């Protein structure tokens, strides 16, 4: 069951998402519906984050794994094939999303239950309904990035 089509996040948007999330080296970042792995690869390569992507589609998983291997990032990036509703994310410092608002709403109880206080959630183009963003960035043509902190989002 797909809850969002694959649309590759533009590079400038991915970089701004990581900047707004204030990702630090060694932090754990999860990208739910990671597609081809662009964001998790950038987080590991450019910042030194420990990145995990969760994706349903096998073809996208293979693309991500090929690029991870090519860049020799296997020690910092892993990709899990599966439904992100079924994968524990409690060790995440940051969760990134490029899902629909309805998918974000369905995901909200999982985020609230599993993430530690202060964890950051960054969503590309779609709000998490019912949460108050700590920041909204809309200076990228046609894109909006919503940043939330667990414990401050209500």
Image: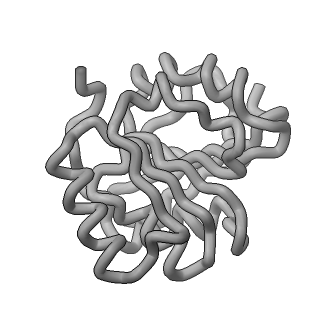
Q: Is residue 133 above or below residue 23?
A: above
Q: How many marks?
A: 0
Quadrant of the drawing holding the N terminus = top left
Q: Is residue 76 above or below residue 85?
A: below
Quadrant of the image occupied by residue 36: bottom left
Is any atom of residue 35 visible in this view? yes
Quadrant of the image occupied by residue 27: bottom right
On screen, residue 103 versus residue 109, left or right, reads left
Residue at 75%, 32% in the rendered image:
153
- Tell which of 142 and 17 is nearer to you: 17
Quadrant of the drawing holding the C terminus = top right
On screen, residue 84 versus residue 64, left or right, reads right
On screen, residue 96 versus residue 1, left or right, reads right
Q: Position of residue 133 (x, y in %)?
A: 67, 40
Q: Position of residue 74 (x, y in %)?
A: 45, 70
Residue at 41%, 24% in the rendered image:
103
On screen, residue 39 versus residue 107, left or right, reads left
- Tell which of 146 and 47 is nearer to you: 47
Q: Position of residue 44 (x, y in %)?
A: 53, 72
Is any atom of residue 98 visible in this view? no
Q: Position of residue 97 (x, y in %)?
A: 47, 43
Residue at 60%, 64% in the rendered image:
50
């Amino acid at each position: 069951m797909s809850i969002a089509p694959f649309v590759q996040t533009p590079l400038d948007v991915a970089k701004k998402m990581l900047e707004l999330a204030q990702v630090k080296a060694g932090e754990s970042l999860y990208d739910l519906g990671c597609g081809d792995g662009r964001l998790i690869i950038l987080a590991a390569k450019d910042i030194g984050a420990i990145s995990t992507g969760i994706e349903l589609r096998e073809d996208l998983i293979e693309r991500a794994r090929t690029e991870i291997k090519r860049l020799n990032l296997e020690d910092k990036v892993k990709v899990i094939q599966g439904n992100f509703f079924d994968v524990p994310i409690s060790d995440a410092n940051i969760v990134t999303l490029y899902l629909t608002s309805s998918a974000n709403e369905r995901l909200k109880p999982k985020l609230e239950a599993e993430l530690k206080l202060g964890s950051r959630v960054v969503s590309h183009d779609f709000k998490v309904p019912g949460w108050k963003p700590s920041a909204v960035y809309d200076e990228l043509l046609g894109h909006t990035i919503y940043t939330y902190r667990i414990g401050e989002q209500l």
